[in-house]
Image (cartoon, rainbow, N blue to C red):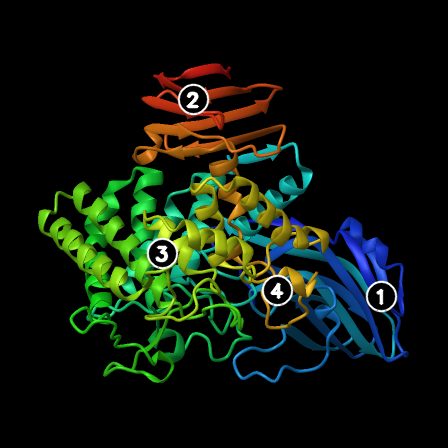
């Protein structure tokens, strides 16, 4: 039975509209919260499909009266058509989200039989007599936070994309950062990074990020390996009595033994990003040993002594003595035109994690760790230059000695994010098939902004996330097929329509369009580099440990004007405009800056 989690804050919502009904009298009366609707008896199944117009993470409370025995069924879904589905899934780890009740005559209050993630609730009944519904309330829970961040610009499509991204993040802030609140209800290492950055730019919350990082740490095996999801450390909602009971094999040995190598890199980088954003260095004594152990474990899987050789070349069939199953996961589905297991991309992600480890070593004055990270990076870079680079085209490759370069979208962004240059790879990437949506898309977008391709980055955001807006979604989907497939939705019962790893615009739009980013831990120093592209204006508020930063950038005919409000503890702010104008502000206050 669903019970409210004391760690969360809850709101009650009435149905927003009646999406569909069958043999139901006055179902619209349920929209106001309390009002009688009748499911007519004697006609087989009568039903009413309720749309709450938002993601509900929690439970449903239905008050009704039946005159005789009745069978009630409630189907919960994030997508309208799926809420009407009756066919069972041919899947042994996921079941349709359904509660069923056999009632005697009388008044009843029905509570969801576990935690549910849904936008739509289809209430159906079979009875010989009428059934009166007189109250339907959804109880939605989120982590206890205050929403402080915002974004607006002259393009309403981007505004709506930010809205659904922000809504997704808030829904995924539960007892930890959940990847998907309907499916899977797990703390995945790769999803953590996108969700944290999005959540921080929206709320400034530190507590849930810290809690999630410690869950990941507690999932680590003694050898240093960390499973792809942190179920071992408590990062799962699959409690059979009041949690996600409709995923019978999750979590299981598959999750606890599945090692996604680039996700382990994300954990190390996630620690550095946490400190850089929040300024909270008190977490470092609790996680540094874990981060170092993870980095050194990954190195055991890369044979740098035998050129071009990998311990995990055949990872799909490879399990080590611990029973670990290894994967390099660049996206959430296999595309024949993409490199799903791009080893080149992973190597650059590992370099990025070494960069992060070096910075963490500097913060903790760990000279030995700094030296190890630097030496390992140098060896790895030499290995990559010899075996993962096309000498003729100068482009980095997905696989060693790859014949044909340029078909993958994965390696080039991670070259950029590792601090290297790959102009040919970036150009080819932007002409290639767009990857299925997910965390990989977030890093692709960030790499574009970093290299000055703001027009292309905003184009891809508007295209991919815009399809969700066009489909009237209130949250971000787990994936989206490539544009040339003309997908406007995906009707897959296994799909997640509220997925934290897809919420990147919640932080990328304020961080890269308005351009607000920390240049010192905890936003003690700030860099603002707007990328308006064709926008007339953009405005954002970003929470920091010492107050909020608000910046508005307006384009005039020949220059830009910025209106800027800084909190008291910002020591220095550097503003750089697209036209090359740069201004440094010492101290805090409210400023109007015009580039001319």
Residue closer to the observer: 462 or 171: 462
Mark 3 or mark 4, which is nearer the start of the sequence?
Answer: 3
Closer to the observer: label 4 or label 1? 4
Establish if 276 lies above or below 129: above
| Sequence-wise first label, 3 or 1 | 1
Secondary element at image label 4 = loop
Check contact, mark 4 vs mark 1: CB within 8 A: no
Q: Position of residue 200 (x, y in %)?
A: 44, 42
Q: Quick check: marks 3 and 1 in contact, CB under 8 Å?
A: no
The image position of residue 196, as x and y in percent, is 42, 49
Which residue is found at the position 47% from the left and 70% from the top? 238
Foreground mark, 2 or 3?
3
Dot 1: what SS?
A: strand
- Using the numbered discs, state the Cα–Cα distance from disc 4 to disc 3 in whole angstroms: 30 Å
Which residue position is annotated with label 1? 21
Q: Nearer the viewer, mark 4 or mark 2?
A: 4
Q: Nearer the viewer, mark 3 or mark 1?
A: 3
Residue 394: give its label.
3
Pick the front one: 273 or 240: 273
Residue behind mark 2? 566
Relative image position of residue 324 (x, y in whole percent): 30, 78
Q: Which residue is mark 4?
A: 481
| Element type at mark 3 | loop
Mark 1 burial class by Cα count in 10 Å: few <14, some 14-19, many 20+: some
Question: The N terminus appears in which quarter of the rendering?
Answer: bottom right
Q: Disc 4 or disc 3, which is closer to the eye?
A: 3
Q: Decide which of tag 2 and tag 1 comes sooner along the chain.
A: 1
Few, some or many residues within 10 Å of mark 3 (<14, 14–19, 20+): some
Q: Give the residue drawn at x 84%, y 54%.
A: 29
The location of residue 505, given as percent across then percent down, is 54, 46
State the residue in front, 152 or 400.
Answer: 400
């Amino acid at each position: 039975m669903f019970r409210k989690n004391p760690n969360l804050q809850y709101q009650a919502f009435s149905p927003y509209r009646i999406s569909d009904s069958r043999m139901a009298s006055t179902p619209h009366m349920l929209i106001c919260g309390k009002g009688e609707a009748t499911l007519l008896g004697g006609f087989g199944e009568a039903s009413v499909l309720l749309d709450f117009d938002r993601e509900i993470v929690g439970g449903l409370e239905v008050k009704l009266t039946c005159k005789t025995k009745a069978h009630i069924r409630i189907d919960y879904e994030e997508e309208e058509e799926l809420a009407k589905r009756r066919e069972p899934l041919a899947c042994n780890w996921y079941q349709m989200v359904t509660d069923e009740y056999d009632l005697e005559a009388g008044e009843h209050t029905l509570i969801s039989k576990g935690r549910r993630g849904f936008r739509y609730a289809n209430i159906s009944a079979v009875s010989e007599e009428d059934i009166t519904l007189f109250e339907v309330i959804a109880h939605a829970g989120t982590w206890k936070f205050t929403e402080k961040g915002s974004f607006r610009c002259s393009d309403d499509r981007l505004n709506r994309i930010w809205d659904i991204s922000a809504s997704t993040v808030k829904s995924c802030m539960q007892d930890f950062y959940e990847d998907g609140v309907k499916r899977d209800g797990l703390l995945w290492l790769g999803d953590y990074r996108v969700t944290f950055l999005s959540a921080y730019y929206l709320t400034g919350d530190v507590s849930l990020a810290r809690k999630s990082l410690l869950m990941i740490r507690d999932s680590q095996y003694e050898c240093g390996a960390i499973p792809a999801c942190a179920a071992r450390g408590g990062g799962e909602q699959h409690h059979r009595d009041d949690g996600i009971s409709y995923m019978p094999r999750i979590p299981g040995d598959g999750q606890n033994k599945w090692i996604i190598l680039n996700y382990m890199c994300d954990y190390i980088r996630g620690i550095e990003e946490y400190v850089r954003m929040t300024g909270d260095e008190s977490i470092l004594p609790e996680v540094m040993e874990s981060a170092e152990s993870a980095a050194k474990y990954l190195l055991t899987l890369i044979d740098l002594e035998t050129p071009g050789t990998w311990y995990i070349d055949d990872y799909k069939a490879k399990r080590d003595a611990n029973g670990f199953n290894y994967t390099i996961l660049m996206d959430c589905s296999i595309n024949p035109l993409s490199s799903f297991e791009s080893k080149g991309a992973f190597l650059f992600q590992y370099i990025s994690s070494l960069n992060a480890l070096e910075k963490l070593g500097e913060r903790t004055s760990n000279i030995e760790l700094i030296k190890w990270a630097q030496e390992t990076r140098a060896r790895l870079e030499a290995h990559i230059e010899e075996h993962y680079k096309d000498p003729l085209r100068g482009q980095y490759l997905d696989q060693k000695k790859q014949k044909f370069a340029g078909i993958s979208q994965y390696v080039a962004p991670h070259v950029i994010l590792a601090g290297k240059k790959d102009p040919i790879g970036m150009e080819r990437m932007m002409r290639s098939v767009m990857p299925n949506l997910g965390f990989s898309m977030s890093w692709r977008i960030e790499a574009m902004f970093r290299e000055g391709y703001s027009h292309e980055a905003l184009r891809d955001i508007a295209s991919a996330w815009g399809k969700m807006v066009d489909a009237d979604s209130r949250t971000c989907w787990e994936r989206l097929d490539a544009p040339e497939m003309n997908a406007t939705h995906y009707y897959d019962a296994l799909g997640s329509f509220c997925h934290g790893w897809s919420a990147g615009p919640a932080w990328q739009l304020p961080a890269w369009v308005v351009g607000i980013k920390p240049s010192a831990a905890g936003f003690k120093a700030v860099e603002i580099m707007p990328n308006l592209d064709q926008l007339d204006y953009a405005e954002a508020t970003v929470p920091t440990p010492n107050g909020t930063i608000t910046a508005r950038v307006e384009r005039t005919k020949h220059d830009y004007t910025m209106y800027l409000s800084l909190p008291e503890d910002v020591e220095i702010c550097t503003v750089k405009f697209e036209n090359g104008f740069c201004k440094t502000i010492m101290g805090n206050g409210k400023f109007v800056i015009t580039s001319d």
